[in-house]
Amino acid sequence: MPVTTAKTINLIVDTSLYPLDAIQAAAYTLTGRAYVRIARSGSRAASVTLKLKAAGGDPTALGDEFHNELLHECLRLKVSHANRKLREYIVTKALVSAQTPGTPPSAPEPAAEEAACPECAAEAQARAPQTPPAAPVDPELEKEIEKLLREIEKSGPAQDDPLGVAVPWEKKYGAQAKKAPARRKRSAKKPA
Amino acid sequence: MKKTPAAAELAPFDPVQTGFFRFRRMGERFLITNDFGRHCILSEAEFRNFSAGQLDEASPLYGRLAHDGFIRNRMDFDSQVAGWRSRNRFLWQGPSLHVVVVTLRCNHRCLYCQSNSVAMSNRGCDMSLETARKVVDRIFETTSPAVTIEFQGGEPLVNWPVVEFIVSYARRKNREAGKHLWINLVSNLSLLDDRRLDFLLKNQVNFCTSLDGPADLHNKNRVFSGGDSHARTVGWFKKIYRRTKSKMFRIEALLTVTRASLPRHKAIVDQYVALGARGVFLRSLSPLGMARGVWDRIGYTAEEFLDFYRRACDYILEVNRRQVFFEQTARIFLAKIMTDEDPNFLDLRSPCGAGIGQIAYNFDGGIYSCDEGRMFSRMGDESFRIGSVHEGAYKDSVGHPVIRAIAVASCLDNQICCSSCAYKPYCGVCPVHCYAEQGTIMGHMPSSTRCRIQKGILDYLFEKLEDPKTERIFRKWLKQAKDRISYQRQ
């Protein structure tokens, strides 16, 4: 049961149901309006204290909001963990292919075997809220990402500036400058 | 009484079928977005079924979600990779916007002046011709194939010889460099004359001025000892508008919303429509420069601004029954929401444009991460200085630790609330604004005024996008933007 005073509410959250990452993220969203303290409460629970910054607020409503946000954060964690490798693959491939315009590296599509991945199947079955699911592991995808990451590391003149942003125009393009592709940037005008 | 979480909040998740998504509750519905900027608005039941991987594969909704990269085992990787690359292409370009402050002197005393301009007698705050030449030389070292030189101040026309020199020298230098060169003059226009106008038009300079609405409101905000600021601005606006009507370089006006503007949304929009403007840019105040000192008089809360914004946009949509007339913030967001092209508005991207999209050059040759960073210098804080045209090299500035820190701070993946926000694909943080408001470049989004304003505007736009008639109007706004962008200056 939550313990409430005029400006404060203390909630005990079962950490076997809600991951600590989700508890922290949900509490953080309220830090504009409340001071937050998170502490251990026994071996399977966390104590969350929310203290309103301004007078006149309702700490019970704040606690309710925290609980709903906690559910949101649990779902976000699961979605994020399950798709981490896939997102890394897409971003890495986009970054590598952009370094050699017109010749994006060919790479086998990942996830062909993911549907059959035992970890995924187990996760889909369980759908337990205790901990975020581990990202499905595909050895081919792992290898491909590693390869692409190695290419990025090798490709720049220095690891310090892999995209060559700091290389002066003349040095980068030289006589080719006139043939450089066109792209217009939008300005950020300020009041006169 | 304690609220019971809605069923959708307890949605199960299928890690095999359901791809990555972010979500936001919109009343009884859910907005979902993904890394490719695609979005869909779902009912609670649809959201639950989508998350649980239980949508009917034969349904149009499933088809749409699969096409947009929300269904994990139906991903078209080549298409998604190309989409991601297209939306983030600014990462490979380097600084394109170069803000040049040719003087800090100004003949206006605007209540909200971000630049902390100085009196007209203070000639020590003008850029010299020697510094101007070094600035242009440094600008042309940028890796970006497109360059926009933007004159800011103070009032740039106060130091006309340097404006004239930079325009001529940059055009001449570009004959060698072969970049796509754009030049913008941000001016109150009060010091313009026909000879200067002829020179600027001959050199295809774009004009941007400030117009805060009808005369009484404009003159209250923009105090001008030399007479009627509104009359001069409107007079020159009309003249330049006529002379550039058939051209692709043109004049635009910007509005800064103060507390006095809040009840005047109709009068402001009517003023812009009457002038023949294509749209209006409803911009909230920044807590920089003089605005910071008089915030109690001219400032407002995020909620007050959003109330104004919604009323003004509702009225603009009424105007669109007669003619196409857009709101610029909305148009920037809509381009990100409804197309795969990012308009590269430097304050609304991840990471922001500071140092890697724009650079600001002060009158004395000092180089800053961005114009906002340069404004801090006027407040006695040199935190955003990244070099000088008189020493060091281009690489030292763009690779400066300050730029790296700003890039980290403005990368939304590093921001706790932003990384999981449904509006992440469309939004951006300004570390300088965070520094001004909260004392840290990392910012704290749960208490950020700017964050509340951006979210409020996006809430409004997604709400309006559900109405097919309004969506058609929004598409017309984007078509206008496309027409403009397709032009390339030779």
Image (cartoon, coloured by chain):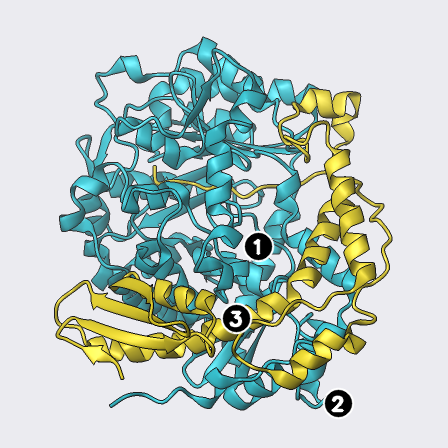
Q: Quadrant of the C terminus of chain B?
A: top right
Visual hue assigned to chain A: yellow
Chain letter for the cyan colouring in the rendering: B
Which residue is disc 3 drawn over? A76
**Residue B246, position as x, y percentages in the image:** 57, 45
**Marks 3 and 2, how far apart in space?**
27 Å
* Label 2: which secondary element: loop
Which residue is disc 2 drawn over? B58
- Tell me, yes or no, whether dots 2 and 1 are on the same chain: yes
User: How many other residues sit within 10 Å of disc 2, few (<14), some (14-19) or many (≥20)?
Assistant: few
Query: Which of the numbered marks, if any, corresponds to residue B481?
Result: 1
Instruction: Name the amino acid type tagged 1.
Output: Ala
**Residue B382, position as x, y percentages in the image:** 34, 26
Residue at the image point whose x is 27% and y is 84% from the top: A1
* Label 1: which secondary element: helix
Tell which tag, 2 or 1, sits nearer the viewer: 2
Looking at the image, do the residues carrying marks 3 and 2 touch, with CB atoms under 8 Å apart? no
The answer for which chain carries disc 3 is A
Q: Is residue A133 visible?
A: yes
**Marks 2 and 1, how far apart in space?**
37 Å
In the rendered image, the residue lying farthest to the front is: A43
Q: Is residue B126 above or below residue B116?
A: above
Residue at the image point whose x is 54% and y is 28% from the top: B398
Instruction: Name the amino acid type tagged 2.
Output: Ala
Q: Which numbered disc, 2 or 1, marks the residue that appears first in the sequence? A: 2
**Residue B329, position as x, y percentages in the image:** 44, 56
Q: Is residue A144 above or below residue A179?
A: below
Residue at the image point whose x is 28% and y is 63% from the top: A36
